[in-house]
Amino acid sequence: MSIIVDLVRNVDSQLDQVQVLPGGIYEELYNQSLDITSPPQIQELQKIVKELSVTALSTTLKPSRISTLLERANLLELPNNRREKDVINLYGNELQWILIGKAATQIYGLLLETLLEQMIQLNGHIRYWEKVIHSHSYSSLYAIQTSPKKLWSWSNDIYHDTINRVKMMKGSHENLSLREIRSNFLARWRQFYSLLKKSIHKKSLESLQRRTLSPIALCQSEARQKLSHLKRLRDTCASGLGILIVEGLVFDMGDNDLKENYDFNGWKDVVEESISYMDTVLKNVLSLDTGASKFENTVFERLSREPHTSLMEENVIQVAHPARLSERLQYILKVLIPNHNSYSQKLARLYGQPSRFERLWLPSVVLLLSSTAILQLSIRKRDLIVSIIKDLGKTSRDFCINWLLEPIKKVISTIRHDPESELALMSKESLSGDRDSLERMVIDFMRDNSRSTGLDSSFTESEITNMRKMVREGNLTPILRAYEKELKNPLLGIIWGDLLRTLLIQIQKSKVDLEIALSGIDALLKSQELVFGFVGLTPGVLVCFATIQYFLGVIRNMSGSKKGYKASQSIRILDRILTTTPIGDDQLSYKCCGLLFCEVHILRKHADKLFPANVEREFLEDINDLCDIRLGLRAQHKALKRIRRGYAKWLQ
C-alpha cells in the first residue's frame, strides 16, 4: 500500500469525525421534528461527499472524476446574511464545506503522488548522468548515441543562418531588374556559396573554445550541466512535497478533540490554507531559476500576501466561500495540474537521459545491416540448425522421461509396496528351489547309502521330516561322514564310491548358503528401497532446479528487479538524509522531508515482495515511525536503526 493512500485516508478519517452542526442545533431539530436531509440538493451533496470519501479499498480519484463531482455539486454563491433560524441552509452550507474538504483531500493526494513520481523519474535521470560523468565507456556510448542529433542541430543552425544572410542580401538588391538578376545568376550562386561558407566559419568560431576538449570531455561537461539542472529541480520538488506534507491539511487534533473541543470553524481555515499551499506550490515548483530555499521563501511570501476569509465570526453563514474554493479547486485540476505535467515532461526531455530511439538506433542499425548476412548464414546452415534444435528437444525429452518421470514412478511404486519392484539381487523363487533340490539330494543319498550297507532304505515320515529340518538348519553330518570315509581311498571313491556325489551335494550346500546371504542383503535393500528411489531422483531434480534458478536469475537481471538491493540503497539514502540535518535542529527541513518520503515510498512499494505477510506488517509500523515528523529527529534515527537491525535479512 502506498504511503500517499495512508496520508489521504488519515485526513479523510479526521474530516469524517468533524461535526457538521453544533450540538445545540440537533436538539432544536428534535424539538421541531425537522428533516434537514429531505431537500434534493442536500441529498445530492451527501452522495457526492460519499463518492469523494476514501474507503479502505480505494485510492485517490482521477482528476477528471473529481472535477465532474465538483461541477455536479453546483455550489452556488449566495450573499452573506444572518440566518440563525434557517437550519436547512446552515446544514447545506456545512455540507458544502465537508465536500470541499473531501475534494481538497483527494487533490492533495493527487499532488503528492504526482510529485513523488516526478522525483523518482528525476532520480533515474540523475543516476544516468552520474554514470556518464564517472565512466568513459558510458561517455563514449552517449557521444555515439547523440551524434546524429548534434549533427542535425549543427546543420539546421547553419541552414537558418544562411537563409537569414540571403534575406539580408535580397533586401539590399530589391531595385534590380529581372534581366540583371538572370545575368548575375552565376555570381549569385557564388555569393550563396560564400554566405554558406561564412555561416560554417561562424559556427566554427563559436565552437573554437570547445575544440580544446575531447569528445568525451564535451559529453561529460554537457552531462554535468544537465545533472545540475536535474538536481535543482529534484530539490525544489522535494521542498514542495515537504511543504504539502508538513503544512497541508494538518488539523493537529486527536479523535476525541475533533469531536468535542475542536473549533466549529477552525478546520475550514486549514482546508482553505491547504488549497492555497497546493495552488502556490504547483505554480512555482518547476522553476529552475530558484533553489530549494528560495522556492520555500517564495511560497510562504505569496501565502502571506494572499487574503483569507475570516470564518470565526459568530452567527454568519458564508455560503459564497465554498463556491469560490470549488472554482479554485477546478482551476487546479483543469489548468495547473495539466500545465505542471506537460512542463515537467518538457523538462525531462530537455535535461533527462536520451530518448529510447536515441539509445537504440545504433544497435538497430547494426542489426539491420547485418540482417542479410545473418539470413544467408541461417539458410546455409539450415540443416545443422534444425538438427541441433531436434537434438536439444530429444535430449530434453529423454532427460525428463529417464531422470524425472521414471524415478518418480519408482518412488510411487515403492511407497505403494508394489510387488513388481525391480530392486533385488536374486530372483524371488531361486532360494526355495535350490533348498528343495538340496533336501532331495540328501534324502536320496541317505536312502542309497542305507541300501548299500544292507540296512532298511525305507524311512518313516518323521525321519524324512527330521532330515529336511537338518538340511534347512545347514546340518549335513551324514553327508560329511560319508565324504570323510571316501577320502581315505579317493581313487576308489571316485570310481566305485560316492566321493563325487558327496562333493556335488556340498557344492549345492554352498550355493544355498550363498543365496541365503544374498536374500539377507536383498531384504536390507528392500527396506531401504524408498531411500534409493529418492537418490535416483535427486540428480534430475537438482539439474532442473539449477536450470530454473539460472533462467529466473537472468530474467531478474534483465528486468532490473533486484528489490533487495534497491531497498538497501533506499535505507542508505535515508541514513544520509537524517545525518545531513544540522545537529541543533530537532526536525527535518522541507527538502529533507520530501526526500525522506520519496525513499519511504520506494520502500513501501517493494515491501510486499521483500517480506512475508507478518514481517511486512511490522516493517510498515517501523516505517510509519520513521515518517512521523512530530516524533523528532532523534526518534527517526532510532526507527531507522531498528529497521536496519531488524530487517537486515531481507534487505541484502
Image (cartoon, helix red, strand yellow):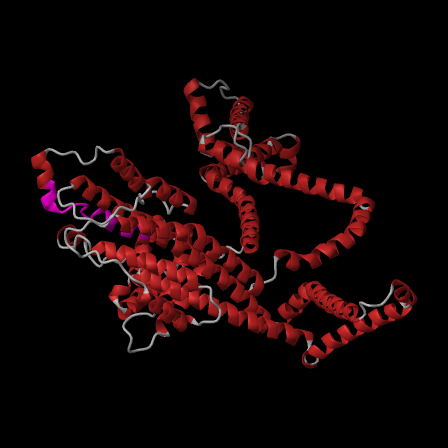
Residue at image coords 59%, 69%: 132
Image quadrant containing the C terminus: bottom left
Residue 38 % position (x, y): 21, 32
Establish if 429 lies above or below 586. above
Residue 306 % position (x, y): 32, 63
Between 253 and 192, the one nearer to me in the picture:
192
Look at the image and say whether residue 20 sits in the magenta stretch. yes
Can residue 477 be seen here? The reply is no
Can residue 136 be seen here? The reply is yes
**Left or right, residue 633 beside residue 161:** left
**Left or right, residue 140 beside residue 283:** right
> How would you classify the magenta stretch by its main secondary structure?
helix
Residue at image coords 54%, 42%: 536
Q: Number of labelled discs?
A: 0
Q: Which residue reaches farthest left?
A: 31
**Left or right, residue 616 beside residue 541:** left
Between 159 and 559, the one nearer to me in the picture:
159
Look at the image and say whether residue 619 sits in the magenta stretch. no
Establish if 411 lies above or below 646. above
**Left or right, residue 500 beside residue 380:** left
Establish if 405 lies above or below 213. above
The picture quadrant where one finds residue 57 is top left
Residue at image coords 19%, 48%: 81
Residue 235 % position (x, y): 43, 68
Residue 495 % position (x, y): 66, 32
Between 262 and 530, the one nearer to me in the picture:
262
Between 607 and 111, the one nearer to me in the picture:
111
Establish if 69 lies above or below 362. above
Q: Which residues are magenta?
A: 8-26
